[in-house]
Amino acid sequence: RIYRRQVEGVEPEALEVLMSYPWPGNVRELENTVEGLYVLGLRRIIRVTDLPLHIRKRADLGVAPTGAMSIRELEKETILRALKMAGGNKSKAAKILGISRNRLYRKLKAYGLEE
């Protein structure tokens, strides 16, 4: 809690937008967006209207999550999707995410996803 905000999660509609956005800047763009939402933290739950306009406009609302996810859960889901896209290859997944392989391994361990 670097900024001492009390953001607790993301509403389902906002999560749909975040999950369906293509993230051309990979995980760095996602991290910057989430950090920005956290810094602005006007509410405890991030809403669609809190998301940057360019993300709301480009998102394809095809995913329907069942409930709000925490920022931690969102990151975990993003990592799992990258691994799936990379066919389980961690080096390729790290490239997709725009992070080092070592950082990916640390995150996998933190989320209990290591094999």
Image (tube, grey):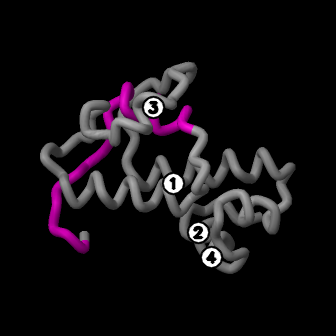
Q: Nearer the viewer, residue 30 or 78?
A: 30
The answer to which image quadrant residue 67 occupies is top left
Q: Which residue is mark 2?
A: 107
Q: Could you tell me how far apart the alpha carbons at marks 1 and 2 are, in whole angstroms?
A: 9 Å
Q: Are marks 2 and 4 in contact (CB under 8 Å)?
A: yes
Q: Dot 2 lies on which element?
A: helix
Nearer the viewer's eye, disc 2 or disc 3?
Answer: 3
* Residue at 72% from the left image edge and 65% from the top image edge: 94
Which label belongs to residue 17?
3
Nearer the viewer's eye, disc 1 or disc 3?
Answer: 3
User: Horizontally, is 27 left or right of 104 in the view?
Assistant: left
User: Horizontally, is 48 left or right of 44 in the view?
Assistant: right
Q: Which residue is mark 4?
A: 103
* Residue at 25% from the left image edge and 49% from the top image edge: 8
Mark 3 Cα-neighbour bin, 10 Å: few <14, some 14–19, many ≥20: many
Q: Are marks 1 and 2 in contact (CB under 8 Å)?
A: yes
Q: Which residues are magenta?
A: 2-21
* Residue at 19% from the left image edge and 69% from the top image edge: 3
Q: Which residue is mark 1?
A: 75
The count of marks equals 4
Mark 2 Cα-neighbour bin, 10 Å: few <14, some 14–19, many ≥20: some
